[in-house]
Amino acid sequence: VLPSDNMKRIFAKYASEVDIDGNPYMTLDDFIQSCSDREGIDINDSTMRLRMANTYHILRKTNGVQKISLANFCLFHLLMARPDPEVDIAFLLLDQDRSGTITLHNIKHFLGERPFDFDSDFIHRHFAKKKT
């Protein structure tokens, strides 16, 4: 995603940290504040803050370093401009290895210890009998 001058300006306004290479990045609070100011999000709404925190955690993984770079900030805004951003974000959340596919292993990893019927019609319909 190529950042526009406007996105660079917005990112520079809110990014409060700098990595060891001198590149600015956003913290969770920076990210939420930037979205609040631009989108009119109430940062005191606990549900909205949780949604923003979940989005932040998806975006911040860059080569194992936990931060939101300019590129990730631009990607977030690109996704949010799409017709169904939640679908795209859910896909990114499940596709942790960035292969472009979601496997049953990805779903099991995401759900962790949460109870789920892996012999359900949903699993059979979307992952076939082999469950791959």
Image (cartoon, helix red, strand yellow):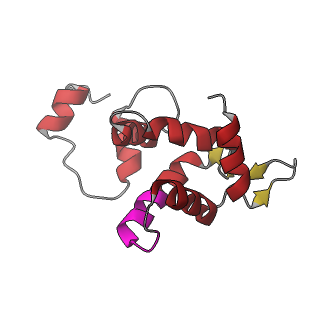
Which residue is at a point 25% across and 57% down the rendered structure image? 115
**Viewer-proximal residue among 116 and 32:** 32
Q: Residue at x 52, y 54 (%)?
A: 38
Residue 123: x and y in percent read 20, 35
Rendered view: 98 above or below 77: above
Classify residue 13 by image quadrant.
bottom right
> In the rendered image, which quarter is residue 29 located in?
bottom right
Frontmost residue, 9 versus 120:
9
Q: Is residue 44 magenta?
A: yes
Q: Work out whether residue 54 or residue 84 is closer to the camera in this orientation and state it.
A: 84
Q: Residue at x 57, y 63 (%)?
A: 33
Establish if 129 lies above or below 24: above
| Residue 17, quarter of the rendered image | bottom right
- How many labels, in total? 0
Q: Nearer the viewer, residue 9 or 99?
A: 9
Which residue is at the far left? Answer: 121
User: Which region shows up in magenta?
Assistant: 43-53
Quadrant, the N terminus: top right
- Left or right, residue 90 beside residue 63: left
